[in-house]
Amino acid sequence: MRNVTGVTLITGFVLLTGCGSASGTPGDSHSRPPATAGGSAPGSSAGSAPAGQDGHRLVLRGWISGGIAGRGGAGTFPEFSLYDDGSAIAPQGGLSGPVRPTEYRLTPTALQGLLSEAHAAGLARSRTVDRPGVADATYLTLMFRAGGRIATTRIIEVGTENDPAERFWRQQLHVQGTGNGIEFPAADLARDPAPYRPARLAVLASDIGQDTAEPAKDWPLAPLNRGERVGGRSCTVLTGVELAKATQVLAADPRARWRSGGQTYLVSSRPLLPDEAGCRSLNSR
């Protein structure tokens, strides 16, 4: 990451799946003036980046979905989330196995440099870089907030386009081929990385019926069938003592079947990020 001062932008990243149509042109790094990372979007526009529960605003997000493996979907933990106080949250070791989010804290200089590079990559204008006819494509989508608005850049079939937006994702942020997901130089960090401690935990339950070949345990917390729907699962948000209890029981036996309300469920947990207020946030991607 190159450290550049003097420009602050608010960005976000998404990786989606499917095929789309080309629209727009490559972003112009001078097309819009950057906003300040600490500023708030004017009004209540749908294009405004949401503020976190602790008052910090999301400035960058990225995740992978689609492709032959069919990654992603509702409730998937994003590969990277960055907030305007310099905190960054990413799953340790990528997304294979249980989610173990790690929190990083960028220095002000590193934060400004990363966002300046995003602006230089031309993310201030919405556009799509298409490759028609590609089956099982992986989409790289970059949502960039500048001047209180969000522009969206989508690149279809990641790895095949020599595009500034994709180079930004690969070279400035995402370390490819290491199996370690996100990585920052030590000089860019204000403190050592640490496990992310969420204030809210989403419990996701998949109903597998009444009778199963394996015995089920009694679920010790609120009934699993009363939550909101996230994809095909029931979602309940826990905090405080219940969060700690759910974390404990699910870590002890991640593959257990749980009995609740006369039904049997497979249960997993999803730490909510600072900008995610509840289960509804997990359906937005």
Image (cartoon, rainbow, N blue to C red):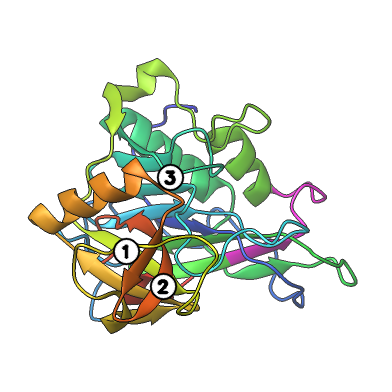
Q: Please indicate whether residue 265 sits to the left or right of residue 105 in the image.
A: right
Q: Which mark is residue 99?
A: 3
Q: Is residue 154 magenta?
A: yes
Q: Which tag is nearer the camera, tag 1 or tag 3?
A: 1
- Residue 212: percent from the left, percent from the top? 52, 69
Residue at image x 86%, y 67%?
Answer: 135
| Outermost residue toward the left in this view | 241
Between discs 1 and 2, the one toward the N terminus:
1
Determine contact: label 1, label 2, CB under 8 Å: no
The residue nearer to you, when weighing 220 against 235, is: 220
Q: Which residues are magenta?
A: 153-163
- Residue 251: percent from the left, percent from the top? 33, 43
Mark 3 belongs to which amino acid?
Answer: Val
Determine contact: label 2, label 3, CB under 8 Å: no
Residue labelled with disc 2: 264
* Helix, strand or loop for disc 1: strand
The residue nearer to you, when weighing 194 against 33, is: 194
Among the 4 quarters of the image, the one containing residue 23: bottom right
Between discs 2 and 3, the one toward the N terminus:
3
